[in-house]
Image (cartoon, rainbow, N blue to C red):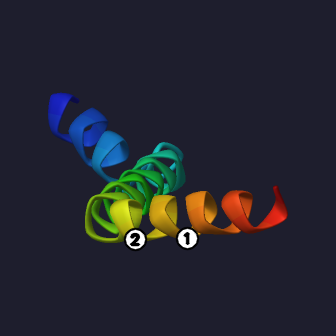
Amino acid sequence: MIKKELLRLYADESGQSTTEYVLIIALIVVACVVAVRLFGKKIRELFIKAAEEIQ
């Protein structure tokens, strides 16, 4: 009886897609943080230069 219930729980994949979505979102967040850390200063300088040229 317990073995049957454990096998049923093991075969249940209803929460699997939620876990996959959380992992994908976590990877996207990490990629965004890395991109900002790498390119943030250069992008800021570009915006400052553009703002100075507009004025």
Task: Give the residue displayed 49% in from the left and 58% down from the top.
Answer: 44
Residue sitting farthest toward the left:
3
Instruction: Give the position of the N terminus as an image quadrant.
Output: top left
Task: Give the residue displayed 44% in from the left and 47% down from the top.
Answer: 22
Drawn side of residue 2 relative to residue 5, left or right = left
Whether the residues at callouts 1 and 2 have beta carbons within 8 Å, the answer is yes
Label 2 CA crowd tier, 10 Å (few <14, some 14–19, many 20+): few
Residue highlighted by disc 2: 42
The three-letter code of the residue at mark 1 reads Leu
Give how far across and how far down residue 3 sits, in percent.
Answer: 16, 39
Give how far across and how far down residue 29 sits, in percent.
Answer: 41, 53
Local secondary structure at mark 1: helix
Residue sitting farthest toward the top:
2
Which label number is shown at residue 21?
none
Give how far across and how far down residue 27 sits, in percent.
Answer: 35, 62
Residue highlighted by disc 1: 46
Instruction: Give the position of the C terminus as an image quadrant.
Output: bottom right
